[in-house]
Amino acid sequence: MRYLSHLAMTVTLALFLSTPTHAQNPPAVSYLDGTVALSAAPDHSMPPIGKLLVTAPLRPLSREGDWLRVSMQGWTQAGAERAIYAAPGIRVLHAVLSSSAVEMLVFSEQIADPDTAQLWTKTELQGWIKTPDLKPSLRDIWARAEPLFAQRCTACHQRRIPHHYTANQWTSHLKVMGPRTGLPKDDQFLIRAYLQYHAKDADRLARAAVQ
């Protein structure tokens, strides 16, 4: 089923990128289902400049073979621009970058987090990823995350309800509980994202996230 879903998304992207009118209309956002390496160019010989994490919102810009050039918007904290988050003050991690990749970022508006007074900047990142698994909505990703959470996160304790904690509290909890599940890192990231997007402050996350 994941193969068929990936094939359908590949066909959709190919049709979009071959349509001449896409230059006038912003491409639709798709959501990354998994973790992928980010490159500065569609070149196997070049080392990655970072990685994109599950639920990262991506806009396709162009394609070259198996490589897709994408744009992603998010928020960075002043002095810590190597990490891009979904919203200011809410640490839903979408990208982790090398020092060299920071020079490629485009910064725009700034806001101060009312709770911490920390300065956050709206940030755009562009780069190349190879054969990504993209989904048209977050619901498609939650369809895989929810049963995984239900099956693997009740072995040691009663099942926790996502909206009992904030997104940032789930980050702290999963640092401790994630390794206990025995799941691969990618699946731990998936469960963390699912819990954060269904957390007590999920409405605030939805309002503040860059689309």
Image (cartoon, helix red, strand yellow):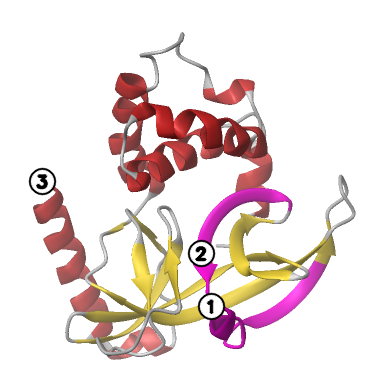
Q: Whole-percent x and y of residue 106? A: 63, 83
Among the two numbered marks 3 and 1 on one chain, the one whose residue lies closer to the N terminus = 3
Identified by mark 3, the residue type is Met
Which residue in the protein does label 1 denote?
A: 125
Separation (CA) of disc 2 from disc 3: 27 Å
Q: What amino acid does circle 1 point to?
A: Leu
- Of the numbered discs in the image, which one, if any, rests on residue 95? 2
The label number, if any, that marks residue 1 in the structure image: 3
Q: Residue at x 15, y 70 (%)?
A: 11
Q: Within the magenta stretch, is there residue 107?
A: yes
Question: Residue 27 at x, y = what percent?
Answer: 40, 75
Instruction: Give the residues drawn in magenta, as a range.
Output: 89-110
Of 113 and 52, which appears nearest the observer? 52
> Badges 1 and 2: C-beta atoms under 8 Å apart?
yes
Residue 61 percent across, percent down from the top left? 37, 83
Q: Nearer the viewer, mark 1 or mark 2?
A: 2
Which is more toward the observer, 205 or 28? Answer: 205
- Amino acid type, callout 2: Ala
